[in-house]
Protein backbone atom coordinates (compact mmCIF):
# COMPACT_ATOMS: atom_id res chain seq x y z
CA UNK A 1 0.00 0.00 0.00
CA UNK A 2 1.25 3.53 -0.76
CA UNK A 3 0.10 4.76 2.67
CA UNK A 4 0.68 3.40 6.15
CA UNK A 5 -0.36 4.59 9.61
CA UNK A 6 1.40 4.37 12.96
CA UNK A 7 -0.50 5.16 16.17
CA UNK A 8 0.77 6.29 19.56
CA UNK A 9 -1.26 7.65 22.50
CA UNK A 10 -3.77 9.75 20.64
CA UNK A 11 -1.45 10.69 17.78
CA UNK A 12 -1.56 9.12 14.32
CA UNK A 13 1.34 9.40 11.88
CA UNK A 14 0.11 9.06 8.31
CA UNK A 15 2.99 8.02 6.07
CA UNK A 16 3.53 8.41 2.33
CA UNK A 17 5.05 5.01 1.61
CA UNK A 18 6.30 5.17 -2.00
CA UNK A 19 9.93 6.15 -1.48
CA UNK A 20 11.00 4.72 -4.84
CA UNK A 21 8.81 7.38 -6.51
CA UNK A 22 9.76 10.13 -4.01
CA UNK A 23 6.19 9.69 -2.74
CA UNK A 24 4.62 11.08 -5.93
CA UNK A 25 0.85 10.60 -5.86
CA UNK A 26 -1.17 8.56 -8.36
CA UNK A 27 -4.86 7.65 -8.12
CA UNK A 28 -4.38 4.71 -5.76
CA UNK A 29 -2.14 6.79 -3.52
CA UNK A 30 -4.59 9.72 -3.48
CA UNK A 31 -7.50 7.49 -2.51
CA UNK A 32 -5.44 5.81 0.21
CA UNK A 33 -4.51 9.19 1.72
CA UNK A 34 -8.15 10.27 1.80
CA UNK A 35 -9.14 7.00 3.46
CA UNK A 36 -6.38 7.42 6.06
CA UNK A 37 -7.37 10.96 7.00
CA UNK A 38 -11.09 10.19 7.06
CA UNK A 39 -10.28 7.31 9.41
CA UNK A 40 -8.26 9.71 11.58
CA UNK A 41 -11.16 12.16 11.64
CA UNK A 42 -13.60 9.44 12.71
CA UNK A 43 -11.26 8.01 15.36
CA UNK A 44 -10.57 9.02 18.95
CA UNK A 45 -7.11 10.26 17.93
CA UNK A 46 -6.48 13.89 18.79
CA UNK A 47 -3.83 15.02 16.31
CA UNK A 48 -1.97 13.68 13.29
CA UNK A 49 1.44 13.94 11.70
CA UNK A 50 1.84 13.70 7.91
CA UNK A 51 5.29 12.42 6.83
CA UNK A 52 7.00 10.97 3.79
CA UNK A 53 9.14 7.83 4.00
CA UNK A 54 12.54 7.65 2.31
CA UNK A 55 13.79 11.20 2.71
CA UNK A 56 11.18 13.17 0.77
CA UNK A 57 7.79 14.47 1.82
CA UNK A 58 6.22 14.33 -1.65
CA UNK A 59 7.45 15.08 -5.18
CA UNK A 60 3.94 15.96 -6.37
CA UNK A 61 1.53 14.50 -8.88
CA UNK A 62 2.74 11.28 -10.50
CA UNK A 63 4.04 12.33 -13.94
CA UNK A 64 3.28 8.90 -15.42
CA UNK A 65 -0.35 9.51 -14.53
CA UNK A 66 -0.20 13.05 -15.92
CA UNK A 67 1.27 11.79 -19.20
CA UNK A 68 -1.43 9.12 -19.51
CA UNK A 69 -4.06 11.87 -19.60
CA UNK A 70 -2.96 12.85 -23.09
CA UNK A 71 -5.71 10.44 -24.16
CA UNK A 72 -8.82 12.67 -24.30
CA UNK A 73 -11.27 10.03 -23.10
CA UNK A 74 -9.10 9.07 -20.15
CA UNK A 75 -8.44 12.72 -19.32
CA UNK A 76 -12.13 13.64 -19.18
CA UNK A 77 -12.95 10.59 -17.05
CA UNK A 78 -10.19 11.58 -14.62
CA UNK A 79 -11.36 15.20 -14.40
CA UNK A 80 -14.99 14.11 -13.94
CA UNK A 81 -13.94 11.90 -11.03
CA UNK A 82 -12.34 14.88 -9.30
CA UNK A 83 -14.89 17.58 -10.11
CA UNK A 84 -16.52 19.52 -7.30
CA UNK A 85 -20.18 18.67 -6.57
CA UNK A 86 -22.89 21.25 -7.03
CA UNK A 87 -23.68 23.38 -3.98
CA UNK A 88 -22.12 22.80 -0.58
CA UNK A 89 -21.91 19.01 -0.73
CA UNK A 90 -18.48 17.79 0.43
CA UNK A 91 -15.82 16.94 -2.12
CA UNK A 92 -13.43 14.51 -0.51
CA UNK A 93 -11.00 13.58 -3.29
CA UNK A 94 -8.55 15.94 -4.95
CA UNK A 95 -5.90 14.84 -7.47
CA UNK A 96 -3.39 14.74 -4.57
CA UNK A 97 -5.91 13.12 -2.21
CA UNK A 98 -6.89 14.93 1.00
CA UNK A 99 -6.32 18.52 -0.16
CA UNK A 100 -10.09 19.24 -0.10
CA UNK A 101 -10.82 17.65 3.26
CA UNK A 102 -11.90 19.99 6.05
CA UNK A 103 -11.01 18.15 9.22
CA UNK A 104 -11.92 19.13 12.78
CA UNK A 105 -8.56 18.05 14.23
CA UNK A 106 -5.02 19.33 13.62
CA UNK A 107 -2.55 17.85 11.15
CA UNK A 108 1.17 18.66 11.37
CA UNK A 109 3.29 18.25 8.26
CA UNK A 110 6.73 16.73 8.93
CA UNK A 111 8.80 17.69 5.91
CA UNK A 112 12.11 16.19 4.90
CA UNK A 113 13.59 16.65 1.44
CA UNK A 114 11.26 17.73 -1.34
CA UNK A 115 7.73 19.06 -0.85
CA UNK A 116 7.24 20.33 -4.38
CA UNK A 117 4.43 20.89 -6.87
CA UNK A 118 1.44 18.93 -5.55
CA UNK A 119 3.58 17.88 -2.59
CA UNK A 120 3.86 21.54 -1.64
CA UNK A 121 0.08 21.79 -1.88
CA UNK A 122 -0.28 18.89 0.55
CA UNK A 123 2.16 20.61 2.91
CA UNK A 124 0.10 23.81 2.71
CA UNK A 125 -3.04 21.79 3.53
CA UNK A 126 -1.53 20.88 6.91
CA UNK A 127 -2.27 23.16 9.86
CA UNK A 128 1.39 23.46 10.88
CA UNK A 129 4.60 22.60 9.03
CA UNK A 130 7.82 21.38 10.67
CA UNK A 131 10.68 21.35 8.15
CA UNK A 132 14.12 19.81 8.30
CA UNK A 133 16.83 22.39 7.61
CA UNK A 134 17.63 20.61 4.32
CA UNK A 135 14.00 20.42 3.15
CA UNK A 136 12.50 22.67 0.50
CA UNK A 137 9.31 23.60 -1.28
CA UNK A 138 8.58 24.95 -4.74
CA UNK A 139 6.03 25.07 -7.54
CA UNK A 140 8.20 22.77 -9.65
CA UNK A 141 5.22 21.83 -11.83
CA UNK A 142 5.82 25.23 -13.51
CA UNK A 143 8.42 23.39 -15.58
CA UNK A 144 5.89 20.92 -16.99
CA UNK A 145 2.94 23.17 -17.75
CA UNK A 146 0.88 21.77 -14.87
CA UNK A 147 -1.15 24.15 -12.75
CA UNK A 148 -1.80 24.32 -9.03
CA UNK A 149 -5.08 22.41 -8.61
CA UNK A 150 -4.98 21.19 -5.01
CA UNK A 151 -5.26 24.43 -3.07
CA UNK A 152 -1.85 25.91 -3.80
CA UNK A 153 -3.11 29.10 -5.42
CA UNK A 154 -5.62 29.52 -2.56
CA UNK A 155 -3.54 28.67 0.51
CA UNK A 156 -0.16 30.08 -0.59
CA UNK A 157 -1.24 33.77 -0.63
CA UNK A 158 -3.11 33.32 2.65
CA UNK A 159 0.16 32.29 4.26
CA UNK A 160 2.69 34.60 2.60
CA UNK A 161 0.68 37.39 0.93
CA UNK A 162 -0.28 37.89 -2.69
CA UNK A 163 2.96 39.36 -4.01
CA UNK A 164 5.24 36.71 -2.51
CA UNK A 165 2.80 33.97 -3.58
CA UNK A 166 2.90 35.22 -7.16
CA UNK A 167 6.70 35.39 -7.13
CA UNK A 168 7.03 31.82 -5.81
CA UNK A 169 4.33 30.38 -8.07
CA UNK A 170 5.30 32.10 -11.31
CA UNK A 171 9.05 31.54 -11.07
CA UNK A 172 8.72 27.96 -9.82
CA UNK A 173 11.92 28.45 -7.83
CA UNK A 174 13.22 26.39 -4.93
CA UNK A 175 12.22 27.76 -1.51
CA UNK A 176 14.51 26.40 1.17
CA UNK A 177 13.51 25.71 4.76
CA UNK A 178 15.01 28.86 6.30
CA UNK A 179 13.10 31.08 3.90
CA UNK A 180 9.93 29.02 4.32
CA UNK A 181 10.06 29.68 8.06
CA UNK A 182 10.86 33.37 7.58
CA UNK A 183 7.93 34.06 5.23
CA UNK A 184 5.30 31.84 6.88
CA UNK A 185 5.41 28.62 4.85
CA UNK A 186 6.78 26.75 7.87
CA UNK A 187 6.47 27.23 11.60
CA UNK A 188 9.59 25.40 12.75
CA UNK A 189 12.94 24.32 11.27
CA UNK A 190 14.78 21.39 12.84
CA UNK A 191 17.98 19.43 12.10
CA UNK A 192 18.05 17.07 9.13
CA UNK A 193 16.36 13.76 9.86
CA UNK A 194 14.37 15.00 12.86
CA UNK A 195 11.24 16.50 11.26
CA UNK A 196 9.07 13.50 12.09
CA UNK A 197 10.14 13.25 15.74
CA UNK A 198 9.76 17.01 16.22
CA UNK A 199 6.30 17.00 14.64
CA UNK A 200 5.22 14.01 16.72
CA UNK A 201 6.45 15.74 19.88
CA UNK A 202 4.34 18.78 18.97
CA UNK A 203 1.34 16.56 18.17
CA UNK A 204 1.59 14.93 21.61
CA UNK A 205 1.80 18.37 23.24
CA UNK A 206 -1.46 19.33 21.52
CA UNK A 207 -3.09 15.99 22.32
CA UNK A 208 -2.61 16.35 26.08
CA UNK A 209 -4.90 19.40 26.33
CA UNK A 210 -8.72 19.34 26.69
CA UNK A 211 -9.78 18.91 23.08
CA UNK A 212 -13.01 20.90 22.89
CA UNK A 213 -11.07 24.13 23.41
CA UNK A 214 -8.26 23.08 21.06
CA UNK A 215 -10.72 22.38 18.26
CA UNK A 216 -12.82 25.47 18.92
CA UNK A 217 -9.81 27.79 18.73
CA UNK A 218 -8.52 25.98 15.63
CA UNK A 219 -11.95 26.29 14.01
CA UNK A 220 -12.22 30.00 14.84
CA UNK A 221 -8.78 30.78 13.40
CA UNK A 222 -9.62 28.97 10.15
CA UNK A 223 -13.23 30.09 9.77
CA UNK A 224 -12.67 33.78 10.47
CA UNK A 225 -9.77 34.28 8.05
CA UNK A 226 -10.46 37.35 5.95
CA UNK A 227 -13.76 38.19 7.65
CA UNK A 228 -14.62 41.67 8.96
CA UNK A 229 -13.58 41.91 12.62
CA UNK A 230 -17.09 42.19 14.04
CA UNK A 231 -18.32 39.17 12.08
CA UNK A 232 -15.21 37.22 13.06
CA UNK A 233 -15.71 38.04 16.73
CA UNK A 234 -19.23 36.61 16.55
CA UNK A 235 -17.86 33.33 15.16
CA UNK A 236 -15.15 33.21 17.81
CA UNK A 237 -17.73 33.81 20.54
CA UNK A 238 -20.04 31.08 19.28
CA UNK A 239 -17.24 28.52 18.92
CA UNK A 240 -15.70 29.40 22.27
CA UNK A 241 -18.98 29.46 24.19
CA UNK A 242 -19.88 25.99 22.97
CA UNK A 243 -16.50 24.62 24.05
CA UNK A 244 -16.66 26.27 27.48
CA UNK A 245 -20.12 24.85 28.07
CA UNK A 246 -18.86 21.39 27.15
CA UNK A 247 -15.63 21.27 29.12
CA UNK A 248 -14.20 24.67 30.10
CA UNK A 249 -16.06 25.25 33.35
CA UNK A 250 -15.15 21.81 34.67
CA UNK A 251 -11.53 22.32 33.60
CA UNK A 252 -11.33 25.67 35.37
CA UNK A 253 -12.64 23.99 38.53
CA UNK A 254 -9.94 21.32 38.34
CA UNK A 255 -7.28 23.99 37.89
CA UNK A 256 -8.65 26.00 40.82
CA UNK A 257 -8.56 22.96 43.07
CA UNK A 258 -5.19 21.71 41.85
CA UNK A 259 -2.28 23.53 40.20
CA UNK A 260 -3.78 27.01 40.58
CA UNK A 261 -4.42 26.69 44.31
CA UNK A 262 -0.80 25.79 44.96
CA UNK A 263 0.72 28.16 42.40
CA UNK A 264 2.13 25.23 40.46
CA UNK A 265 2.19 25.91 36.72
CA UNK A 266 5.03 23.56 35.84
CA UNK A 267 2.80 20.90 34.26
CA UNK A 268 0.58 23.23 32.26
Image: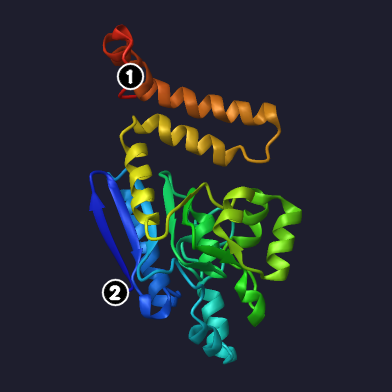
Return the residue nearer the eye: 155 or 165.
165
Residue at screen point 34% across, 49% down? 200
Q: Which mark is residue 49?
A: none
Q: Could you tell me if residue 91 is visible in this image?
A: no
Q: In the image, what residue occupies the spot 55% across and 28% down? A: 236
Q: Is residue 169 above or below residue 45?
A: below
Q: Residue at the front extreme?
A: 191
Q: Quadrant of the C terminus?
A: top left
Q: Residues within 10 Å of mark 1 (few under 14, many from 20)?
A: few
Residue displayed at 74% across by 61% down: 166
Relative image position of residue 106 (x, y in whole percent) = 42, 45
Count every numbered label the image shows and give the total: 2
Q: Is residue 2 above or below residue 255?
A: below
Label 2, residues with CA under 10 Å away: few <14, some 14-19, many ≥20: few
Instruction: Please report whichever mark, 2 or 1, sits nearer to the chain's N-terminal start.
Output: 2
| Residue 50 place in picture, x, y as percent | 39, 57
Is residue 237 visible to us here? yes
Which residue occupies the extreme right position in the image? Answer: 163
Q: Horizontally, is 85 left or right of 34 in the view? A: right
**Place of residue 208 in the rendered image (x, y in percent of width and height, measured from the top left):** 30, 34
Query: Where 14 falls versus 184 (above or below)?
Result: below
The color scheme shown is rainbow
For this view, does 14 lie left or right of residue 123? left
Mark 1 — residue?
Answer: 251
* Callout 2 secondary element: loop
Which of the two residues, 88 or 185, is positioned nearer the viewer here? 185
Residue to which mark 2 is pinned: 1
Amino acid sequence: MPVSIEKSEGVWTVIHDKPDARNAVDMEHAEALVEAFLSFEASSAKSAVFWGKGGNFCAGWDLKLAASLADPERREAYFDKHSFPIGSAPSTLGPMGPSRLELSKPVIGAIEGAAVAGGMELALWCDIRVMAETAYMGVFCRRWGITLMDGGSVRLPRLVGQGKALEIALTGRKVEAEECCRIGLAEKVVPHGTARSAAEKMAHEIARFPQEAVRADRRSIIETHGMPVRDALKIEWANGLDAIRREGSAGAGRFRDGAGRHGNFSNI
